[in-house]
Amino acid sequence: MSSDRHSRFTATSANGRSAESMSPFDPTAVSSLQQFIHANEHRRAPNRPDDTHHLALQVAHSLRFQHNWMDVRLHYQTNRENNGAPGPPRPVISGLPPQRLYVHPDEQIDLLQKQRREGKAGWPEVASEREWVLPTQLGETWSLRRFGEVFDALSTIPPEKQGGPLNFDVVRSSAAGGLQENDDTKSRVPTPGGGPTDGEDAVGRMPDASSGSDAEISGTATETGAPNPSTAPPNPWRTSQPKRMLLASADDDSTIVYYIIHDGLVKPRQN
Amino acid sequence: MAQLTPNVPGIQAPIPIFKLAGRYMLYDVDTITYLRAEHNIMGVLTGQLPQAPQQNVFSGIPLELMPEEARLLCEKGVGYVVDDVKAHKQGFLGCGLSEEERKAFRETLRRQGQAAASKVEEKAMEKKKNALSRPGSTVGDWNDLPEDMLRPASRAAGKKGKRKDRSGTTTPAASNVSDPLALAGSKTNGNAGNGSGDEEESMFGSPADSTSVRKQPPRRAPPAAAQTIESSYPAYHITPTTSYPPLTVASPPWSAPVTPGTPTTEFDGLRTALDTSLSELPDVPPSYPLYKHMHSNGYFQAPGIRFGCQYMAYPGDPLRFHSHFLCNGMDWDEEFDLLDLVAGGRLGTGVKKGYLIGGIEKRGAAGGNMDNDTGHDERNEGVRTFCIEWGGM
């Protein structure tokens, strides 16, 4: 536990409390983000550094609880068609935003024209699309080569049931209080010694309020009531465009800002 | 390629690009139009407009090209660089022009100056006549001359205005007075550009002509007398706007000229002809590969200093479109701060543009292919670009 505190990307606590705070409450209490990091230590692939792992977890925490993303997963390998391609140089995250995150300007025109043809007004309902997220820290230096390497390792559309699901339950149960729940969740986490999980471990946990934290370890994940983009055919606008990913840059004050990067020439949106 | 403007003038290709004080300039309007219509090269107009000199919102020729634009034109064989200072020295001071050519040139300038002067005088006469022909000109403005001053006998009665001595503007050749009169008489309809602006100055005094026979040219000739014969308006000194009718431009460094219609690939056989004169290709910053890549995709690019980037890329002619991208080219392995990327992305999103970075992609390991002598490796791996915009969440 103390080792993470000294790692380069240790986040400040989500609720403002640190273990050395002067709170009259339990002085050994850990912030919810720290608990989350503890609970997902095992997700780190072997021989991979701690700092990028913790950074990725911090970003995942923000995506899930600040931005309400669903099915947030951590990937050390991305299983591209050409299996000879090296994995991403650092762990990447994939997830489903609550609303559609990116609409290409031409697609926007197309959708509006379709609306007009059908006699409707305003913006139509569009299904949300799964996105890749690259966690970074704002003080880093990058180069074009490194961005190229990351893009080369990503598929155009993040796959639905691959990668390592993260244990988000620990965060909610910590609100109820106590480290006891922590132990429970640890025992429930599948394959604690496993490193990168690629499709075999197909436990798609949907940290949905209704499903709670029951141990639903099954071969296939059933998605309950959430918008189901996996059954729909992939959006032709998505497959014909260059790849994109979100660059999440974490600052020292624990704010994370997200930028969309395209691998190619894509005209800007008219915001 | 579809021609958007049917009136693109034909030009003599390849185009000389004049290098002066480290800048690449073009002086011919037809050339500038051709480059914009056919080659997506914009440049920046840097000249002053004589109609509106005290502003710089609208500028005129000459057009200044970015070094990247000049180099692209040279590589394509559409243009070539001419050292302007050397060309002028050689042309005017050296043996560029023969004595007869120089004389003829000077004569042309002098005649133009005299035509301008006579035109001015004619206008002044016209105005005078109109003023005088009005009966009872009490409604004229106070600047008009009182009538008693116009009688020839009382010429000595005061001269209004100050005299401006223009002793510096002697015409090169000896100006005999009879010659301009004959010319002036035949060129009353000549259109001299200086006529309108100089009307005011002729009211205040005539420029002194040091080689003229008469020392004190009268300000006003007798109105009804022969208007042009006694003309004392000396020829104006004309500065030509281009020195290339008397001078001839040096021929391009390669032998076969390129016709404007043929499509040129970037690295066709002309490159070998240019290899010997590679030192004449303009020096460009390391963002040049990105410039070339965007240009080959049909973008117009303007200097991007307004937005803190290297180029602003327009998807078409800038008169029709806003720019789409703020471009920064860099080396494939060049390290940059993520904060700079973030700043560029935020700025771009704020002005409805995308922030674009790119460079030539090198497939080898970092630090491996450091030698750029094997140019073919670089060329085969094109430029890879990334566009950044704010995520909105």
Image (tube, coloured by chain):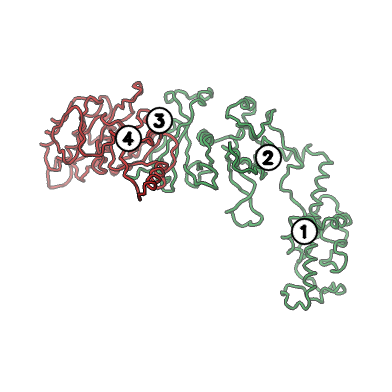
Chain colours: A red, B green
The reply to whether discs 1 and 2 touch (Cβ–Cβ < 8 Å) is: no
Circle 2: is it few (<14), some (14-19), or many (20+) Cα within 10 Å? few
Q: Residue at x 31, y 25 (%)?
A: A79
Q: Report which residue position mark 4 lands on.
A: A132
Query: Mark 2 or mark 1, which is nearer the start of the sequence?
Result: 2
Is label 3 on the same chain as label 2? no
Q: Position of residue A239 (x, y in %)?
A: 38, 33
Identify the residue at horizontal 60%, vertical 37% (top origin): B70
Residue B192 lies in quadrant: bottom right
Mark 1 falls within which chain?
B
Between the C-alphas of marks 3 and 2, the distance is 44 Å
Badge 3 crowding class, 10 Å Cα cut-off, few under 14, some 14 to 19, many 20 or more, is: some
Mark 2 highlights which residue?
Answer: B10
In this rendering, does residue A8 appear at all? Answer: no
Quickly name the residue at label 3: A148
Q: What residue type is disc 2 on?
A: Gly
Residue annotated with mark 1: B166
Q: Amino acid under label 3?
A: Gly
**Dot 3 lies on which element?**
helix
* Depth check, front residue: A33 or A156: A156
Looking at the rendered structure, whether the residues under marks 1 and 3 are on a common chain is answered as no
Q: Is residue B351 visible?
A: yes
Q: Amino acid at mark 4?
A: Trp
Q: CA distance from mark 4 to mark 2?
A: 52 Å
